[in-house]
Image (cartoon, grey):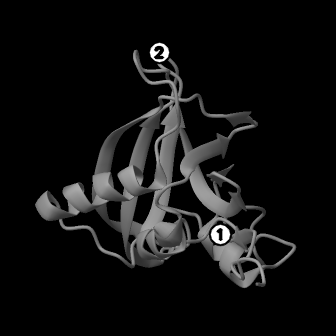
């Protein structure tokens, strides 16, 4: 018999949705979910403290409007008393299913993690990828960088909005 055909690595490169993550996790319900973030591995007994469904309407520095839905999972990196292992993937999915019964979660919403140690500032992360190992899934998070959306959109070397003035004027003027 040939071994499991599922990939051992799934890369999202910091851009994924709630539904994409849940589908990727689905066949691994009995495995531990280990989170790597900010150069560290979360401690066993970590706690999903809040699930937020956000709707954002924005105006960037170039005067461009934008709107999107976001699901934000807040996780406290702390060992809970009596918890000696990591959260199982099935329980993690169950938490999100329970939340979805009470809060409208958009499956296509951008997925964000807020993770931090107790008594320290939370950091914002995107999902970089998943590693599948025997008995556990490694959820790799990458810090979300601040970006100038107009500059990012056009991918120019010289900033047209948030950097030096463009030849056409100052688009960042108020």
Q: Quadrant of residue 102?
A: bottom left
At 47% from the left edge and 70% from the top edge, which residue is drawn?
Answer: 26
Residue 77 x %, y %: 52, 28
At 31% from the left edge and 42% from the top edge, which residue is drawn?
Answer: 50
Above-or-below relation of 129 to 134: below
Q: Is residue 21 visible?
A: no
Q: Are the residues at dot 2 and dot 1 in contact (C-beta closer than 8 Å)?
A: no
Residue 15 x %, y %: 60, 71
Above-or-below relation of 118 to 60: above
Residue 10 x %, y %: 70, 71
Residue that label 1 marks: 170
Residue that label 2 marks: 119
**Is 139 left or right of 160, judged from the image as shown?**
left
Quadrant of the image containing the N terminus: bottom right
Q: Say few, some or many: other residues with alpha carbon within 10 Å of mark 2 (under 14 / 14 to 19 / 20 or more).
A: few
Residue 9 x %, y %: 75, 68
- Spatial CA distance of label 2 from label 1 is 42 Å
Please state which of the two labelled residues, at mark 2 or mark 1, is closer to the viewer.
2
Above-or-below relation of 4 to 9: below
* Residue found at the very far right of the displayed protein: 157
Q: Which of 29/140 is in front?
A: 29
């Amino acid at each position: 018999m040939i071994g499991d055909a599922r990939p051992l690595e799934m890369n999202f490169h910091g851009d994924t949705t709630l539904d994409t993550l849940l589908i990727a996790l689905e066949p691994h319900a009995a495995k531990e979910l280990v989170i790597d973030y900010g150069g560290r591995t979360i401690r066993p007994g970590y706690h999903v403290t809040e699930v937020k469904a956000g709707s954002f309407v924005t105006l960037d520095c170039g005067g461009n409007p934008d709107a999107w839905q976001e699901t934000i999972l807040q996780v406290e990196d702390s060992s809970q008393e009596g918890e000696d292992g990591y959260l199982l993937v099935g329980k993690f999915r169950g938490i999100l299913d329970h939340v979805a019964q009470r809060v409208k979660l958009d499956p296509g919403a951008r997925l964000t993690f807020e993770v931090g140690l107790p008594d320290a500032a939370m950091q914002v992360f995107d999902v970089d990828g998943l590693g599948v190992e025997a008995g556990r899934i490694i959820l790799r998070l990458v810090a979300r960088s601040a970006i100038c959306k107009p500059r990012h959109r056009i991918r120019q070397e010289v900033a047209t909005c948030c950097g030096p003035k463009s030849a056409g004027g100052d688009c960042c003027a108020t």
